[in-house]
Image (spheres, grey):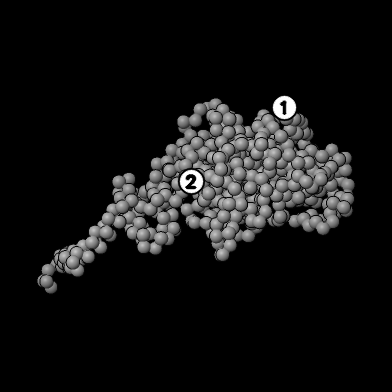
Amino acid sequence: MPHLPLELRQYLTNAARRDFLYHCGLGLGSLALGAMQAQAAAPATSNPTAPRPPHFPAKAKGVIQLFMAGGPSQLELFDYKPKLQALHGKPVPQSYLEGKRFAFLKPNATLLGTKRKFAQHGASGAELSELLPHTAKIADDIAIVRTMHTDNFNHGPAKLIAQTGFQNFGAPTFGSWLLYGLGSESENLPGYVVLLSGPRGPRGGAYLWSNGFLPSHLQGTPLRSSGEPILNLANPAGVDAARQERTVQTIARLNALRHAVTGDDEIAARTASYELAFRMQTSAPELVDISDETQETLDLYGVKPGESSFAHNVLLARRLIERGVRCVTLFHTDWDHHGGGENLEGYLDKLCRETDQPCSALVQDLKRRGMLDDTLVVWGGEFGRTPMGEVRATVGRDHHIDAYTIWLAGGGVRGGQTLGATDELGFYSEDGSDRHHVHDLHATTLHLMGLDHERLTFKHQGRNFKITDVAGEVIQPLVG
């Protein structure tokens, strides 16, 4: 055959090999080839994020985390202290400082009262700052917890604790654990989505939505609120939908063959990611197209079409939950108000104007759509701010980890209550019995989703890990 063209010689050689496999060895070759062809024609491995039953009946089926990155000041927003007002400018009693460390405070720091006015709202009488006029409208829907505490006063580690339960890199985030335990009810969107707003990304970066040591398909997917929802999601020029579908199907068949040999779950995760990306070419643009929202809804959130904002992201969060997404985490910066450029004066006002209305609108909108009962909303940051002021160009406070405020709504939470009381200066829990660690918050949110934090474990490096480590208790007054 040397005189034949190269392509024809290759075809005849391959044909001879196929004929040999089919006829030799009493048909074993044909059996093997047939089995391989059947595997290649079989559907790809099962969807690793398919819905799974909870440990017990759940009160919520989706979570929206409204994360105010930087540490919002509870003393300007939720926890008014008349005694602190009276002692404004005075030295701090030493009994409050023994054995304590702070991130930036100098020895000459003095007590700082607030300039904000507080009033009671709703039938519950929740005491809220004048900076939160819209939150005041949902006072009877939210549960305020004033005595949260955490372990680290630096932003990066504290954010990691808030999202993963650990202050070191490498642990899975809450959304990843949730997806691991329950899967997702959305076939066309990721089960765990992250939305970012503010002048910069949160300290900690992608580790704050990482899958850690859990399988890779459980990581959070950042979604852009304008332009392409996900970069490189659209087909390149010259590749139509039919060709793209054939490519995805071929890759899935090859992955199925390899998965049958190795049993590697990462192959199944990769297949699911390719197939989801293909479906998202249609579903993601439809998600971010808010032209089907009424003007009344846009006004409720304060959304201006075509403008990227926290308000726009909050509306997207509702749309994601409507479409079966399990967890949506919104990070909004900059709440790190030490004084200087970022302060408790005009800068705090600006952030509250950006966030107060959308957060309130989310609860109202979920409620009127009948979604609040099974959607859990959690508002808060990685820590709070000190009762002392910082000596800088403008008014600010340092990081405070011993008592800060969060609020929750929906998803089985008993609204219209305020849990915990701090001492007269706002340093610590008043009697110590109502302190709640971040582990307790994770245990509670998982409980509302029908998961026992003690049973939701993953074996890694010879140890069964869980998001609450060796601690965590459900905050019973929250769950009824």
Q: Are marks 2 and 1 in contact (CB under 8 Å)?
A: no
Is the residue marked by circle 2 packed among few (<14), some (14-19), or many (20+) residues within 10 Å?
Answer: some
**Seen in the image, is 14 located left or right of residue 128?**
left
Q: Nearer the viewer, mark 2 or mark 1?
A: 2
Q: Position of residue 66 (x, y in %)?
A: 61, 42
Residue at the (87%, 52%) spot, across then down: 95
Residue at the (55%, 57%) spot, across then down: 458
Location of the N terminus by quadrant is: bottom left
**Seen in the image, is 80 located left or right of residue 479?**
right
Q: Is residue 120 above or below residue 158?
A: above
- Classify mark 1: helix, strand or loop: loop
Amino acid type, callout 1: Ala
Location of the C terminus by quadrant is: top right
Residue at the (55%, 33%) spot, across then down: 371
Q: Is residue 201 visible?
A: no
Q: Nearer the viewer, residue 100 or 354?
A: 100
**Residue pointed to by mark 1:** 123
**Upstream in sequence: badge 2 or badge 1:** 2
Q: Is residue 431 visible?
A: yes
Q: Position of residue 157 (x, y in %)?
A: 66, 56
Is the residue marked by circle 1 packed among few (<14), some (14-19), or many (20+) residues within 10 Å?
Answer: few
- Classify mark 2: helix, strand or loop: loop
Q: Nearer the viewer, residue 50 or 149?
A: 50
Q: Which circle marks residue 52 in the picture?
A: 2
Amino acid type, callout 2: Arg
